[in-house]
Amino acid sequence: MWITPEEVALKNALKLWVTDRSNDYFLLQHRRGHGDTGGKITGLLVGALDTVLDSNARVAPFRIVLHVPGSQVSWVIASGATVEEVQRHWRWLDQNLLPYMAVFENKEDAASFVLGKVKGLIAEEVLGGQAAREDDPARFREDLARFEQRFGLPQREKLVTHYSCCCWKGRVPRQGSLYLTTNHIAFYSFLLGKEVKLLVPWAEVTRLERVSVGLLTDVIRVHTRRKQRDFSMFLNVDEVMMVMCQLADIALRRLLDSGGLTLDQSLQDSTNITKRVLEEQALRQYVLSLFGLPRAERLQEVMSCSVWTPHARCHTPGTVYTTDGYLCFSSREEGQCTLIIPLTEILSIEKAESTSALPNPVIISVRCKRAFQLIELLHRDELVEKVRHRLRDLHWKQNLISGHDLRKKSSVLLSALGLTISRLIRQRLFKRLWDEHFTEFGRGVHMFRTDKIRKLVALGIPESLRGELWLNFSDACSSLAAHPSYYTDLLERCRGESSIATEEIERDLHRSLPEHPAFQSETGISALRRVLTAYAFRNPAIGYCQSMNILASVMLLYTKEEEAFWLLVTVCERMLPDYFNRRVIGAQVDQSVFEELIRERLPELSERVPDLSPLASASLTWFLTLFVSVLPFRSALCVLDCFFYHGIRAIFQISLAVLDANTAELSSCSDDGHALMILTSFLEQLRHEEEAHVCAEDAGSSHRLNITTLITDAHEKFSAVSVKHVEMLRSRQRVQVLQAHEDSTKDNALRLVTPDVSLSPGDLSELYDLFKTEHFISLYWGDGVSSSSASPAPPAAAGGCVERYVVDRAQFKSLYELLTPWSCGTHTDTVAQRAFTLLDQDRDGLVTFSQFTHMLDLLYCEELNEKIRLLYRLHIPPGSENTSISVLISSSNIYTSLNPEIFTGDAQ
């Protein structure tokens, strides 16, 4: 292939290269030692040197050099893996360039002409290939050539990136190259004549972790179901780990039954995945989690800037992020100062006059008669113009829906549910503190969020402000304002409808805060029914899940019915993504993240309790109900206050604080039940300060930890649990959770098939893996038609977990030829085609695992009469779609070509 011209010193290069052909300007050379069959020491040493230095020579032992007579410097312009490839380039140069080089009087001009022509050829090739989408197309093109030469995979196998590293075999490291593709991890090494190739599908990776091995502290360990591999000596191990976790996560979501996990549209097609796309996706996911934005938001601009913070009387440096519907700011230190401005709240964005004190200022005016000043924007004009364009689109849409607000204005429900038990003096004091805070930091979703408001939230939000602040902190108020009649229309559409979700809702209605007076009357029960039913019809993929009733009932106590609905939408779809799907995958992932955080942040507990899975499992209820079901009601409200302000990060911190407060007791536990009793008792005694006297009287002791103290300790001790860290752990642990579900699916499939066949459990297990691999191959490199038809079917549609993986006709033929004991010679294809037609009873062009297993069981384990019966059925409909007598007679030749041992073995 043509390569970017690279200068070489010809005198030194001749020590490693041998010239085969030459003319006035070009040399065709091969690598010294290449092709030696006797394993000569020269070839071995040169090959090892190439691998260690990551040289082109190992993949391209032939090359063409441009040499200017009289010069000591030459340029490598082409390389090839075979002599035929490089000779093709040589002939092109001889026919198209060499005749014209004689016209140049200056030899240097002739060389410049050749170099320019080669670069043009490379640019043409890059534009037509996947390298065009990379940051360094020429370098990526060379890496891609190495990868294709070394592994010979189909062209649809998309290389994402590659790194130089060591792969450890025992205590021996092997230097080589790690290639990361959309479907595989590939490693190549060549040292002292020994070539090592490793190819691991992402679908087989069960865990990725960073470990310490001996003196090496940054080792990436890749676990599969059969073994583990260690890779080390990366230049940037954090980057490699992030890319590997992303690729494994994406591949498993595409290939396995992810239980309702959604995959971004840009990642659906694996051929579109590049390293740049992965970096953009990681940043987008971080921004959405940091600011709690809707998952459909697309990240648009990211710029460094400073924002004027009136409360601090200074400009706070940080980063501004813009999306389709928001403009957000975060200080350099995460959580120090945060600003979220929905574009629907912005009236104007203007460029102010730039001065030395205020370079490139931008003024943003919002509806509540406030303005925000941004300075030091490097691309100010671009940002202002793009935001203005999005504002025009939003205002046009708002004008279309204005005047169509059909929301019910009645406050009867709110007044009926506004039953509280609080001390009025304390509530008035808190209310005054919050009013002062609003005056200084602003009020509404676009208030400045600083450490001061965090401390106020930890003390507990006054009940008169709780509903308003929940809506503002979570930004549910934006969804409410953007959809003025949505809830009313939804209730009209689902009126009188019944489903499995509505039946489950009816069953759980009276289990929702039954001790609270608001839900001891039909008013509260009816409101809760409407909110849950409306959401079930809004999102049928989720429908209704247990614990949603508990969350919705608490929301109804402090917000109007429609506000409670949008709060529930925000919690289920933004703040707790994937928690409420059919397998609660999101909650399970966070349990694994929590277990990892225990090891990181509570080393004393993790040392004394080696198996942390029971503690993580016990916390599942904490995460699903946000502590509402395990804490006294008023204490649970304080946790909810923190959750709506901090997001899931607050639940992680409070959960760690609970375990930290009970480390001594948990370390001496005799069993899991004892640990659960300790945690339950501790949580039941956590009281709000207003109820401290009640706790003391009931327990007979004044030494009790109140919820405010616990929340404060949680933030101070575990402030390092940042949004970015949680997202990184989620990406890593999601791989493990999805693979655990895949193992359960396999166990269920084998359990259902085993009673009906005589194959051994070991054979069935290997057959399942082989069948699944064949299915995946079509998804890796299929033509798009078979791939889509052979995609995993949902259990409801496919008849259960046995039918999760299916194969089409071409895949079945491949498996049949590999596994069948009937060697039919030239008729094998005919038998395979007819066997597929016979098994495809519903004529959908697919065969399931159970059908394939029963056929192989018949071929290997059944009596001779059953095998003959199968042969007979292959010659009549539906085994044979053509029923003519002539075809049946000609097909009977299959009998004579079968291996006679198949029959004699049974007869004996």
Image (cartoon, rainbow, N blue to C red):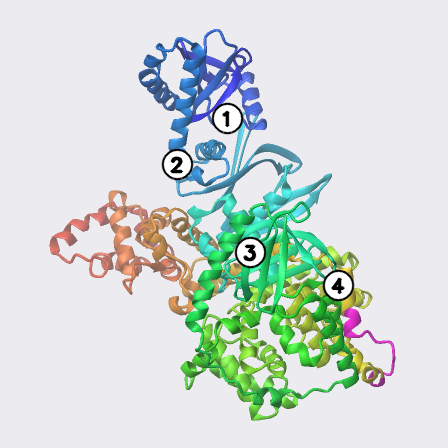
**Residue span colored magenta:** 697-710
Residue type beneath disc 4 = His
Secondary structure found at label 4: helix
The residue carrying mark 3 is: 350
Identify residue type, mark 1. Answer: Asn
N-term-proximal mark, 4 vs 3: 3
Quickly name the residue at label 1: 56
Q: Earlier in the sequence, mark 2 or mark 3?
A: 2
Q: Residues within 10 Å of mark 3 (few under 14, many from 20)?
A: some
Does dot 1 land on a helix, a strand or a loop? helix
Mark 2 residue element:
helix
Tell which tag, 4 or 1, sits nearer the viewer.
4
Asked if the residue at tag 4 contacts the one at tag 2, i.e. Cβ–Cβ closer than 8 Å, the answer is: no
Residue 273: where, in percent of width, then height? 47, 47
Q: Number of labelled discs?
A: 4
> Could you give the CA–CA distance between mark 4 and mark 1, rounded to whole angstroms?
53 Å
Q: Nearer the viewer, residue 556 or 255?
A: 556
Indicate the position of residue 560 as horizontal and vertical percent values: 57, 82
